[in-house]
Image (cartoon, rainbow, N blue to C red):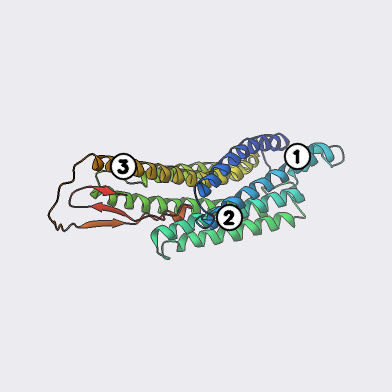
Amino acid sequence: MASGGIPIDIASMISIAMESILYGFSVLMFMGTIWALTYKRSIHDINRPIAAVATLLFMLSTAHMVVDIIRIEDGLVTYRDTFPGGAAAFFADVSQETYVIKNVIYIFQTLLADGVVIFRCYVVWQSIWVIILPSMLWCSSAVTGYYGIYRVAQATSNIGNIFANDTAQWITAFFASTLATNLMGSGLLAYRIWIIERNVSAVCTTKGPMMPILRVLVDAAVLYSVVLLATLICFVYSSNAQYILLDMLMPIISIAFYMVLVRVSINKHTSSHLSTRRRGTVNETQRGTPHIPMKPLQVHISQFMHKDDTSAYGIENHGQPSKCNAEFGSCNV
């Protein structure tokens, strides 16, 4: 099937420009994420697995950016006059080493990000049964993605046509699998957080701390899913615009991951600051009040206990669990 729409050489130049802009945002978000993980924390309190994932995502995005720059230089400068068919034929040749390497990096980053989403689901739900289907879809993404790249790298016919039937079916399956994995994992995660928030809000007069996290989680999932769906549609219709969207996905994956961590950190530090101010106000009030002897008083209070386990997002909760007084409607977080 022949490609259509934007000429592939123009699409390649637009893709590197868009990826560069989004990569700049991802660098800023990565710096914010490192701050969120290390601010006022000792080396032993840092969530090392999440920090490692964030760093690895940044390294993969950087490597993909470097490979894209080399590919643009090869097509427009190095082999512009020597490659048969010129720059357009060079960019259309999917068996080129730079094309294979950049897509191997993309698939690895996609699997890493989807794996983190599945792990978060397991931490929040605390059930292996919930993540069985997302895990199967994740395996499908791995198989179809890397086998599709293998077929592209070994191509001896239909060179220059990524939309050929022998490769298109595997690439389409990969896009569909990773889209389903992300939607299902993010949906399960958001639903569980919403249920927890609703249960806490039912017995607390104040809003729970999870709603801002839920909002940014949904925003990140929608951002990634919309671009991925557009990429799938462009690929199905054999449009060269899929090259632009595909390169944009690399920094968007990192940005979506960093968004959640930064939001959790801001929420955590805000809650800690408000708690400190409340304790200071109570202490000032107690110092200005004369001491009055009180008789012992025994009160039986039923409590609803909810533990704020935010370690799934990369911010560990080292404090006490949230306590909501069901009888009097007060809440101590």
In this rendered view, identify the residue nearer to me: 241 or 13.
13
Q: Position of residue 206 (x, y in %)?
A: 27, 43
Q: Quadrant of residue 298?
A: bottom left
In the image, what residue type sits under mark 3? Arg
What residue is pinned by disc 2?
Answer: 52
Q: CA–CA distance between discs 1 and 3?
A: 57 Å
Marks 3/2 in contact by CB < 8 Å: the verdict is no
Q: Looking at the picture, does residue 51 appear above or below residue 91? A: below
- Taking 82 as reference, is 106 left or right? left
Q: Earlier in the sequence, mark 3 or mark 2?
A: 2
In the image, what residue type sits under mark 2? Ala
Q: CA–CA distance between discs 1 and 2?
A: 30 Å
In this rendered view, identify the residue nearer to me: 219 or 167.
219
What residue is pinned by disc 1?
Answer: 72
Q: Earlier in the sequence, mark 1 or mark 3?
A: 1
Q: Position of residue 200 (x, y in %)?
A: 28, 50
